[in-house]
Image (cartoon, rainbow, N blue to C red):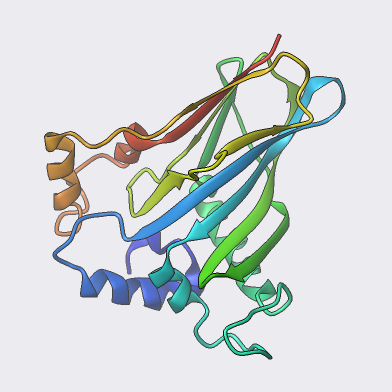
Amino acid sequence: MIRHALLSCVLVAVGMISTASSASAHPHVWVTVHSEVIYGPNGIVNGIRHAWTFDDMFSAYAIQGIPHAKKDTFTRQELSSLADVNVTSLKEFDYFTYARVNDKKIPFVDPVEYWMEFKDSLLTLHFMLPLKTPVAAKRLQVEIYDPTIFVDFEPGKDAPVALVGAPAGCQLQVDVPHTPTAGEQLQLNELDSNPFASSSSFGEIFANKFVVSCP
């Protein structure tokens, strides 16, 4: 089974997707990302709040077999077990979120305030990813990516990143992933037939990146 099945509750579904599209290149799962940097008093960064919306095919497989009272509608409670599996499974992959404060790597702890919603036939995972040690940051850099590109992360079209409670004067810069070059596309095409065609950090060059600079 492919390592980056992402969510253990839908390993079989992802395997079906992979088999059905074995001739196509990575990625196999698409996620649209909206993120918020959450500040506390005195300019302290508490963590990152994510909303990740999965593609329609992945969403359709993920909800199969989940009991629900109303057709084509799922409540937060009905999706609670799926949310539990999501955050548990994502821990192995560091939640695909990497942060540096003042150019030093900083760790996160397990998500809190997590839940899932189903809207317009798409699943969205909401979760707050707290810093292990909240910190005042003159420069915060956050990258969101899957090193092996099984999962593609794309910034939301409207306000992909927001600052919540940030001190006055903080500036936000959002860098969208670049379009693969011909050589990079060739490597992507080889990943399905040869998982070792690129290094495990290949996805870093397609990272969603944002930087917050504060006085």
Q: On the picture, is 78 further left or further right than 96? A: right
The quadrant of the image that shows the N terminus is: bottom left
The residue sitting at 57% across, 62% down in the picture is 124
- 54 or 187, nearer to the observer: 54
**Residue 27 percent location from the top left of the image:** 30, 55
Which one is nearer the viewer's eye here, 56 or 85? 56
Instruction: Please tell me whether residue 87 is drawn above or below residue 76 in the rendered image.
Output: above
Q: Is residue 60 left or right of residue 113?
A: left
Is 171 placed left or right of 146 in the picture?
A: right
Q: Which part of the image, by quadrant, shows the C terminus?
A: top right
Relative side of 82 to 29, left or right: right
Q: Which residue corresponds to the image point at 20% horizontal and 52% vertical from the top-left?
A: 191
Q: Is residue 87 above or below residue 9?
A: above
User: Residue 71's x, y, as percent?
Assistant: 60, 89
Residue 110 at least partly seen: no
x%, y% of residue 61?
A: 44, 78
- In the image, residue 115 sits, relative to residue 65, either above or below, namely above
Q: Position of residue 154 (x, y in %)?
A: 42, 46
The answer to whether residue 197 is seen in the rendering is yes
